[in-house]
Amino acid sequence: MSDSTPDSKAVRGPRDSKADKRTSLPTFYRQVVAELRKVVYPTQEQLVTYFFVVMVFVVVMIALVSVLDLAFGKLVFSIFTGPGQT
C-alpha cells in the first residue's frame, strides 16, 4: 500500500457538522410513525404458518439437545464409574 492513498473519512477526523446536530423529539416521533407505516404486517394465515414452523423447530431442537444430553451423560458416567454401574 502506498503512502499517496488518501485516508477515509473515518480515519481523517470528526464528522461533518450535519451529523452532530440532534433530532428534536417531535421530529423523531414523526420519523418513527412514518417508518411504522412502511411495515408490512403478516396476514393471519402467514402468522399461523410461522407459529407452527417455529414450534416444530423448537420441539426438534429440544429433542436433539435432550438426546445429546442423555448420550453425553451416559458416556461420562461410564467413564468415571465403570461400564457396569450407574
Image (tube, grey):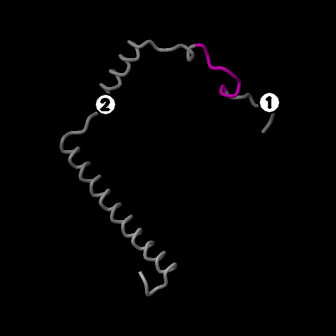
Separation (CA) of disc 2 from disc 1: 46 Å
Local crowd size for mark 2, using a 10 Å CA cut-off: few (<14), some (14–19), many (≥20): few
Give 39 or 81, whichever is nearer the viewer.
81
Identify the amino acid type marked 1: Ser
Percent from the top left, x then y, of residue 75?
47, 77
Q: Nearest to the eye among marks 2 and 1: give it.
A: 2
Disc number placed over residue 4 in the picture, else none: 1
Q: Are marks 2 and 1 in contact (CB under 8 Å)?
A: no
Identify the residue shown where x is 80% and y is 36%.
2
| Residue 69: quarter of image | bottom left
Q: Is residue 54 above or below residue 2?
A: below
Q: Is residue 22 above or below residue 1?
A: above
Work out which residue is located at the far right of the displayed protein and give it: 3
Identify the residue shown where x is 22% and y is 49%.
49
State which region is magenta: 9-17
Q: Which of the marked residues, 2 or 1, is nearer the chain's N terminus?
A: 1
Q: Is residue 41 left or right of residue 28?
A: left
Percent from the top left, x then y, of residue 57?
31, 57
In which quadrant is the C terminus drawn?
A: bottom left
In which quadrant is the N terminus drawn?
A: top right
Q: Which residue is mark 2?
A: 39
Secondary element type, mark 1 = loop
Local crowd size for mark 1, using a 10 Å CA cut-off: few (<14), some (14–19), many (≥20): few
Identify the residue shown where x is 18% and y is 45%.
45
